[in-house]
Image (cartoon, rainbow, N blue to C red):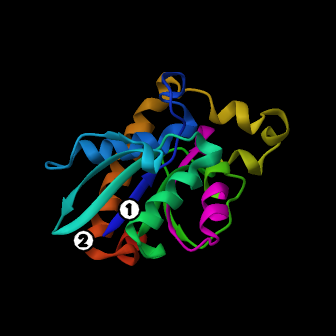
Amino acid sequence: MKIIVGLGNPGSQYLNTRHNLGFNALNYFQDTLADFSPWQSLDKFKALVSEGQIDGEKIILAKPQTFMNLSGQAVKLLVDFYKIELSDIWILHDDLDLPLGTLRLSQNGSAAGHNGVASIIENLGTKDFIRFRLGIAPNGQNIFSSLAKKFLPTKNFVLQKFTTGEKEMVQTINQKANEALKLAISKGIPAAQTQFN
């Protein structure tokens, strides 16, 4: 069994913002799955949930509805209910350390300033879960490696909507995440890391 969580903020005002790329990628993935349930709002998990099976394995998809900086509450509720191993918790989230369109899989890293990941670490008491890091840095660059960091408040940047010119790259990262998730489910995380890292 796997729990795959996409991070984002609930509400129409946050649709297609950079911080909601985890939601976007998980929606794309769910749309490709034939027999998964529609998204259901489950108060006991503080999340929208869809579930089904892939290759005979139960998969729970979840989008926390707690706002980004409290994402860990929903993840903890899911983990406690399903008694799942930490290695079977997979988190999809935006990452300012990676250029837009880039995907990296990692485990046991720091939150690197991401409030959603920090909340998950705090609530689970560990960093030992799988992350699908979806790059959002502009112009193919890491904004933290340039002087732009001083002039572009992170909060303002991540809550901006993707520009028309970036939408093709967003589609590309959604496709990459979809492929990486399916490969990781069928062949394991190391196989996905080999192909996508």
Q: Position of residue 8 (x, y in %)?
A: 52, 41
Q: Which residue is drawn at 68% across and 33% down?
A: 157
* Mark 1, residue position: 3
Q: Residue at x 24, y 71 (%)?
A: 186
Where disc 1 sits, the SS reads strand
Q: Is residue 145 above or below residue 40?
A: below
Q: In which quarter of the image is residue 5?
A: bottom left
Q: Could you tell me which quadrant the N terminus lies in?
A: bottom left
Residues at marks 2 and 1 touching, judged by CB atoms closer than 8 Å: no
Is 129 covered by the magenta stretch?
yes
Q: Give the range drawn in magenta.
A: 118-140
Tell me if mark 2 has few (under 14), some (14-19) or many (20+) residues whose alpha carbon lies within 10 angstroms of its own. Answer: some
Q: Where is residue 161 in the image (x, y as percent from the top left)?
A: 55, 26
Q: Which residue is drawn at 37% across and 69% down?
A: 192
In the displayed orientation, state which residue is furthest to the front. Answer: 44
Q: Earlier in the sequence, mark 2 or mark 1?
A: 1
Tell me if mark 1 has few (under 14), some (14-19) or many (20+) residues whose alpha carbon lies within 10 angstroms of its own. Answer: many
Q: Which of marks 2 and 1 is in front?
A: 1
The numbered dot on residue 186 is 2
Between the residue at mark 2 and the residue at mark 1, the CA separation in whole angstroms equals 15 Å
Residue 103 can be seen in this image: no
Depth check: 165 or 1 in front? 1
Q: Which amino acid does the dot numbered 1 rest on?
A: Ile
